[in-house]
Amino acid sequence: MATSGTVDKPPHSLIASAWRLSMLTNRAVVFAASAFAASVVALSVVSASVLAVPAIGISAAGCGRTAEHATQSEAGDSDAARLESSTDQTDAAPAASSGGRVPAGVGDSGLAANPDGAVTATDPRRDASDNNQGDAGRGTEPGSLGDLQRDAQGDSERDLHPDYAWLPPRTVVADGEHKMAATAMQAWVHEYPDDETAYLGYFRAGRVIDRSEGWIAKTMRCPGGWYEVLPEGYLCRGNRATFDMNDPIVVASWKPARRGDPLPYGYVRPARRNTFLYFVLPTKAEQERTEGSLMSADSAGWLAAHQPNADVLGDPEPVPHFLTDGKRLPTPYGVVQRTRFSVHEGRANPKAAFAIMSVHEHEGRRFGLTTELDLIAIDRTKIVKAPARRGGEVDDLPAGIVRAFSIPRYLFDADDKPMKDGAFTQYQVISLTGASHRDMYEVNDGSYVPAGAVQMIDARTSFPSFASAGTKWVDVSLNKQILVAYEGRRAVYVAEISTGVGGASNPKETFATVQGSYTIRSKHLTATMTGNRQADDYELTDVPYVQYFHEGYALHATFWHDNFGRPQSHGCINLTPADAAWIFEFTEPKVPENWHGVVGHDRTRRSVIHVRP
């Protein structure tokens, strides 16, 4: 088995010590021999189903060839990539095809230098991940079963890998006295206490985590030790996690995402060219020196009070101690370190969006603290307001979506005359019985809606074979721009969406959404999406409720347009923030409490995303 070095036995565990000594000896021999002959390394490699390593880089397709990053699951979708910045080479996992040892000259990431951050043709992980694709990874014909059924159901009874049979019974408890805290944008949890075992998910910087009292193992790349975390897996104490609750990154990352809200953070977009990112709260003189002499007039109190959507961010909070007296903000592990000048890190990308944890007033001006621990002057931004429209839960199909404003709701009296009884709102989703009367559709509650005022969503006449009882899956119609969530064969939610502007064309050549049936590979409460530098160059920090299902293709919330019901995206499936939040909690695998993301693997149920014309 490929390992990251000798695994130390914790002092509190004497389990299977004789076997453990033998294993350590064997690993040491293998490790030493690998320096002389690469063939020895091959002898230590186990099945890819046990040790699949997440690919890292930029997917070649999905959402318009953006730098959206996904995470490969243990079952392995593809060359989709981890979410951290493509230029962050310090976070990367070793190449799966190199037996866990990084080829010379490419660094820890296994990637040769590439200014665009793209996965190169020589990337060893590309071959490993391509060879690991099952039917679900490639996409299946509608109605096929194969590996898709297996992935959707999961295998919770899978045995412990024999190389980890020595592991002691788990002792970590919820709300216990032993804690650690994440210091990285992605503090990765592994299946076993070794960084070459499968990724299960990750914590976000600032989150405080219950852990086991003692370390379970130590490896060459984790000398600080691996600790049990809840509900499963192991987290390394090191660059990504600490015992120090006063660590500057932990303290500054003080506001968690508001999971379940349509927008889990506040969001702003640069409104002017001179929108700077500060790493300290600047004095007035420093602001004028940075932004120009007109800064004072531009940022007057009137502007802050009358800025559109100012109420969305709420009232300013008191300045926290970590921002007082010129204290500098740290950079979380996994965030690209920008060049720092006297008080700022340069201008913000005008096509960016920033997630705001909190707003603070300083020198008569409001500053937002971003999730990447930068400060941005709110008066230099446009404040994002989430689209109000949303889909809705249904009892089953048929259902309808109200297309116009204030459509009368009717009842019929004893003489069969229609009587107005309230109104339906635009975009409201209503469950229908399938019956009609006098050019009106009957609603499940016994009322009626004019047939010409609703978009009808008919019940299916046939189902794919994976639509078995209890299976949660999502049906996406490109022609109708409608998403329907199912439990087995019963529809439970309906929403309008925006898919790729390329329609039904080749997604490898256009901004089209890939068709087929796939299982969800990873889910992220928020994730950063970046466009192609030669095309649109957008940089959207912490896009909400991202669910990758194939390469770079994902379902996610969209706050930058309100054109749902029409193709609009670069290939991803855009949902309103409220719909994305609902679907995120509906699908499987579930993101555990306090985690920021999860990776699907063969012990978890994974919902099917079925994309059709």
Image (cartoon, rainbow, N blue to C red):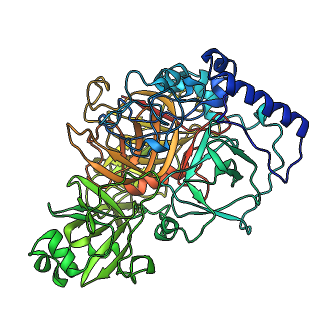
- The percent coordinates of residue 346 (x first, y second) are 23, 59
Image side of residue 481 versus residue 331, left or right: left
Which quadrant of the structure image shows residue 481? top left
Q: Nearer the viewer, residue 477 or 590?
A: 590
**Quadrant of the image for the C terminus?**
top left
- The percent coordinates of residue 556 (x first, y second) are 40, 47
Image side of residue 157 versus residue 269, left or right: right
- The percent coordinates of residue 69 (x first, y second) are 41, 40
Which quadrant of the structure image shows residue 372? bottom left
- The percent coordinates of residue 402 (x first, y second) are 33, 53
Kindly tell me whether residue 443 is visible in this rendering.
no
Image side of residue 386 versus residue 398, left or right: left
Which quadrant of the structure image shows residue 214? bottom right
Q: Nearer the viewer, residue 538 or 37?
A: 37
On screen, residue 390 above or below 520: below
Kindly tell me whether residue 424 is visible in this rendering.
yes
**Quadrant of the image for the N terminus?**
top right
